[in-house]
Amino acid sequence: MQLPAAAPVDATKFCDFVTASPTPFHAVANLAKRLTKAGFAKLSEREQHADLVPGGKYYYTRNQSSIVAFTLPPKGTPNAVSFAVGHVDSPCLKVRPVSKKEKVGYLQVGTELYGGGLWHTWFDRDLSIAGRVIVATPGAKSEFTSKLVKIDRPILRVPTLAIHLDRGVNDQLKFNKETQFLPVLGLINEQLNGSRAGTPGPEGKPKPSFAEERHHPLLLAVIADELGVNVGDIHDFELSLFDTQPSAVGGLNNEFIFSPRLDNLYTSYAAIEGLAEAVEAEAASGKDSDEPNVRCVILFDNEEVGSVSHHGAESNLLPSFVEMLTKLPNADRGYYQILANSFLISADMGHAIHPNYDERYEKNNAPRINGGVVIKTNANQRYTSNAQTTFLLRRIAQRAGVPTQEFEIRNDSTCGSTVGPHLSTHVRTVDIGIAQLSMHSIRETAGSADVRNYINLFKTFFEVYSQVNKELLVDDE
């Protein structure tokens, strides 16, 4: 009897990362730790950095939910950038600014839908909350800190209606997202509901804090206990609901990853890991990089809602980075010249062919799980790949020993999009991904072998792109 193949180490490490990253804030914090381990120094975007040194490795964050990591060439001037970009956000339920709700003996939490989720998959799951919380600094009058919180135990649930009360539910599931999709926090208990209150009022009764006027004291108490603060110290927060079931390697031969937020933590992890492994390999060899390009990973927030934010792909995050390069002492090219010489990989996820719905796919352009990197094209520019950029990507994949496959939609189907269309207005772009099932579900499925495929692609991209680019002679260059 043949035993199942062992779970790939890279896939297991990736699963640990996803489990530890229920929100973009946590993902960025965990990716920053990986960069620090690889020798990257943290910068502040709010300061000028004319003192950056050739061969230096740096990163900075914006809003705690987007990150820019880059290396400067050890020799020469920063004349071009090799970009790998993606996003760290996923569809989820977010706690409303005023979330306190009670109905027929239940405590409920008001939530807002973020992105285009497969919302029916959120029913009957063990849910909890995570995000960032603004808390008062102990002993300081007017000083506040932003802290990350993650409650690991299940405290919320969106229960379905029993089939006995809805006999047609298996024929068609319909529900009102405002009134029938509210998570349950607990049962009303006046003694507990009044616990952990704020400063005593004039009559000796606890005076509700700013947060307690808007959210259940019990919910705030759980957050306060996790952070080691008092409820009255909580002044604001951004919290999301997440499934407490860990990400896992599965399948008969451990060929799958069953996980939340594969779209798009898969890319986020692989891109940063590829850059980190490239610089670590150079350090181990004792040789400087041969790449004359600046090498850069940018991971944006808010892609799932259109990228229109201060930290999304339509912000100035990428342009301001290039502008910073033009201010370095050894820079001899302007902003537009740097962009004209640069190349960008827009990396997201792709749709693997589904065995139960194979008729929904264009048969010649239907990717398979663990089949390697997916090159995504669309004539209507929902993906921004073209013949030049896909050629370069394939050449890089060949150098990396990574297989490639194609994805295009049927003419009678609709198409998603990525950060690529926003960024291709600045720099030539190719759209790629990794094949997965159940995109935007609370539990998605992708391939365990493709984690190493994706890392190797990015690592090779950062090692050899300039060499590959010289192979393509273009009339307008």
Image (tube, rainbow, N blue to C red):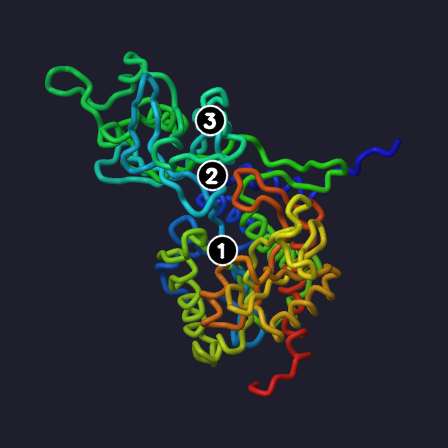
Measure the C-alpha gap from mark 3 to mark 2: 12 Å
Count of numbered marks: 3
Give the amino acid at mark 1.
Answer: Leu
Element marked by disc 1 = strand
Q: Nearer the viewer, residue 258 or 202?
A: 258
Q: Give residue 77's position: percent from left, percent from top.
A: 53, 76
Mark 3 and mark 1: span between their CA atoms?
A: 36 Å
- Whether residue 329 can be seen here: yes
Q: Which mark is residue 160?
A: 3
Point 21% across, 25% down: residue: 208
Disc 1 designates what residue? Answer: 299
Give the amino acid type for the residue marked by disc 3 in the picture: Thr
In the drawing, does residue 4 fall left or right of residue 284?
A: right
Q: Earlier in the sequence, mark 3 or mark 1?
A: 3
Q: Is residue 111 above or below residue 371?
A: above
Q: Nearer the viewer, residue 368 or 2?
A: 368
Say if mark 2 contacts mark 1, CB within 8 Å: no
Q: Residue 443, labelled with which disc?
A: none
Which residue ends up furthest to the right in the rendered image? Answer: 1
403, 351: nearer the viewer: 351
Quadrant in which the C terminus is drawn: bottom right
The residue sitting at 49% across, 55% down in the picture is 299
Q: Residue beneath label 2, please?
A: 119
Residue 346 picture location, percent across and down: 54, 62
Residue furthest bottom in the image = 475
Q: Residues within 10 Å of mark 2 (few under 14, many from 20)?
A: some
Mark closer to the chain start, 2 or 1: 2
Which secondary structure lies at badge 2?
Answer: helix
Q: Is residue 294 in view from this perspective? A: no
The amino acid on which the numbered mark 2 sits, given as a three-letter code, is Trp
